Image: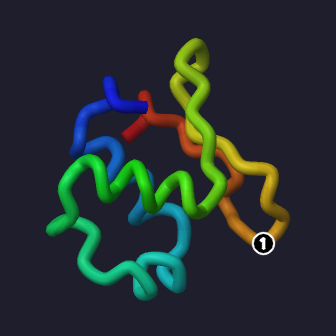
Amino acid sequence: MEKITNIKLKKSLSSIKKDVTQKFGPIWKLDKPKLINKLKQLNYKYDPIKKILYTDSMIRKPRKIYLDSL
């Protein structure tokens, strides 16, 4: 996950859900290690082959975030 650009991580986190982003505050002001920690707190995992972030959580939508499309 450390190899992904900072902009793609920020777009992926802001596309998850507005309620989630409201809890974290302004996402665009966070640096990369804090963004990775937030994604890990939300139980998102990175698949480097498919280049997606995914989760098994039933309450979060979208469950898959395609980083190539951002």
Which picture quadrant has residue 53?
A: top right
Residue closest to the far top: 49
Provide the secondary structure element on which disc 1 rests. Answer: loop
Q: Residue at x 80, y 51 (%)?
A: 56
Going by the image, does 61 lie left or right of 6? right
Give the vertical position of 8 relative to 5 (above or below): below
Residue with the mark numbered 1: 59
Residue type, mark 1 in image: Ile
Is the residue marked by circle 1 packed among few (<14), some (14-19), or many (20+) residues within 10 Å?
few
Whole-percent x, y for residue 36 in the image: 40, 49
Q: Give the quadrant of the N terminus.
A: top left
Give the vertical position of 13 relative to 17 (above or below): above
Q: Residue at x 70, y 67 (%)?
A: 60
Question: Colour mode?
Answer: rainbow
Going by the image, does 33 lie left or right of 57? left
Give the vertical position of 66 relative to 33 (above or below): above
Q: Residue at x 45, y 35 (%)?
A: 67
Q: Give the quadrant of the C terminus.
A: top left
Going by the image, does 26 lie left or right of 38? left
